[in-house]
Amino acid sequence: AQSVSQHNHHVILSEAASLELGCNYSYGGTVNLFWYVQYPGQHLQLLLKYFSGDPLVKGIKGFEAEFIKSKFSFNLRKPSVQWSDTAEYFCAVKAGNTGKLIFGQGTTLQVKP
Amino acid sequence: DGGITQSPKYLFRKEGQNVTLSCEQNLNHDAMYWYRQDPGQGLRLIYYSQIVNDFQKGDIAEGYSVSREKKESFPLTVTSAQKNPTAFYLCASSTGQGAAGELFFGEGSRLTVL
């Protein structure tokens, strides 16, 4: 069965620090990969997604993620975080052509001003 | 405005009672999903439906039931068989086209069992 693992449960950074959140998945076939973000008191919303082509994908608000197939990873990065990036971040995987989207446990990011 | 409407936002239930959470979408999406969100466990898939009159179990379907009689609606019933029903429930929909459809989420329903 497919699964998604996020290694960091709670990350605390100062403004302007660089961010990398890890995400690994287990599934041997074709995958579609997503990062969602949940700002305090708001809906979950899509940050970025990968489904084919360039493994380096860019999303909203300066975020990017790199799909490394050999490592089954899809890590999220941002060169310089802002206080407004404080939120919970979820990695998600859709395996093949199934309709099933599986989420990781989430990472809470706290950015100190 | 197009979107997903979940109701009620807050719900209290006594042990042994069934309760139904509503999810309606006007995005003309084919696929709909129910997730349960618990602290430290992320979102866990309860049920999903890719087309009307069809649905599949997710990873934690025990104690839950759904129906998909209309494209716009995907209600979730939390039955008395669910051992730990207190949680935040999220409904989502997707175009379902291919495997790359983005999920759009509702605001969620918080169920508390007294």
Image (cartoon, coloured by chain):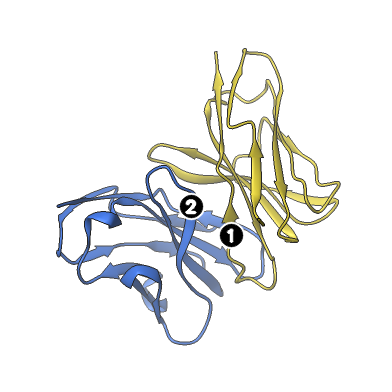
Chain colours: A blue, B yellow
Vertical side of A76 occupied by B77: above or below? above
Tell me the amino acid under the disc marked 2: Leu
**Does residue B40 show up?**
yes
**Mark 2, secondary structure of its residue:** strand
Residue A31, label in figure: none
Mark 2, other Cα within 10 Å: few <14 / some 14–19 / many ≥20:
many
**Picture quadrant where residue A55 is located:** bottom left
Tell me the amino acid under the disc marked 1: Leu
Residue at the image point whose x is 83% and y is 54% from the top: B52
- Residue A14 vs residue A24, the one in the foreground: A14
Vertical side of B19 occupied by A13: above or below? below
Residue that label 1 marks: B103
Residue at the image point whose x is 70% and y is 71% from the top: B97
Mark 1, other Cα within 10 Å: few <14 / some 14–19 / many ≥20:
many
- Residue A90 vs residue B56, the one in the foreground: A90
Chain ID at mark 2: A
Residue that label 2 marks: A44
Residue A105: image x %, image y %?
41, 48
- Residue B108 vs residue B97, the one in the foreground: B108
